[in-house]
């Protein structure tokens, strides 16, 4: 998500809380911001305590995508696509 979207989400959430307007989608905004904060905290903890694992954490998603793409490509080729 872009920072502009998250800033708008935070602004809308705070507006809803101040005006006591419980609009539809407020819970989704709260959970999105909580997930953003949790991800930031998790990243900080990993950087602090798991420095030896950081290269693997960076390469692992790339390797997963390459492996999945290879399997999908082989599946399409075997199916005659």
Image: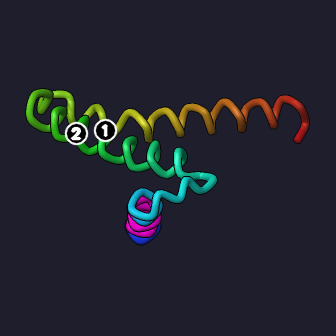
Which of the 4 image quadrants contains residue 19? Answer: bottom left
Residue nearest the viewer, comparing 66 with 46: 46
Residue 11 included in the magenta stretch of the image: yes
Instruction: Name the residue tied to disc 2.
Output: 41
Badge 1: how crowded within 10 Å, few (<14), some, or many (20+)? few
Q: What residue is at 18 percent from the left and 33 percent from the top?
A: 46
Report the span colored magenta. 6-14
Residue nearest the viewer, comparing 26 with 37: 26
Quadrant of the snapshot with the C terminus? top right
**Going by the picture, which residue comes out furthest to the right?**
80
Q: Is residue 15 above or below residue 67?
A: below
Q: What residue is at 53 percent from the left and 39 percent from the top?
A: 65
Q: What residue is at 30 percent from the left and 34 percent from the top?
A: 57
Which of the 4 image quadrants contains residue 17? Answer: bottom left
Contact check, label 1 and label 2, Cβ < 8 Å: yes
Badge 2: how crowded within 10 Å, few (<14), some, or many (20+)? few
Q: Is residue 50 above or below residue 13?
A: above
Q: Is residue 34 left or right of residue 29?
A: left
Which of the 4 image quadrants contains residue 67? Answer: top right
Q: Is residue 28 left or right of residue 10?
A: right
Disc number at residue 38?
1
């Amino acid at each position: 998500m872009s920072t502009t979207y998250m800033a708008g989400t935070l602004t809308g959430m705070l507006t809803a809380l101040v005006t006591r307007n419980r609009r539809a989608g407020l819970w989704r905004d709260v959970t999105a911001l909580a997930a953003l904060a949790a991800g930031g905290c998790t990243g900080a903890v990993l950087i602090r305590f798991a420095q030896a694992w950081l290269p693997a954490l960076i390469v692992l998603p790339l390797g997963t995508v390459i492996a999945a793409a290879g399997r999908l490509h082989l599946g399409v080729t075997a199916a005659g696509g």
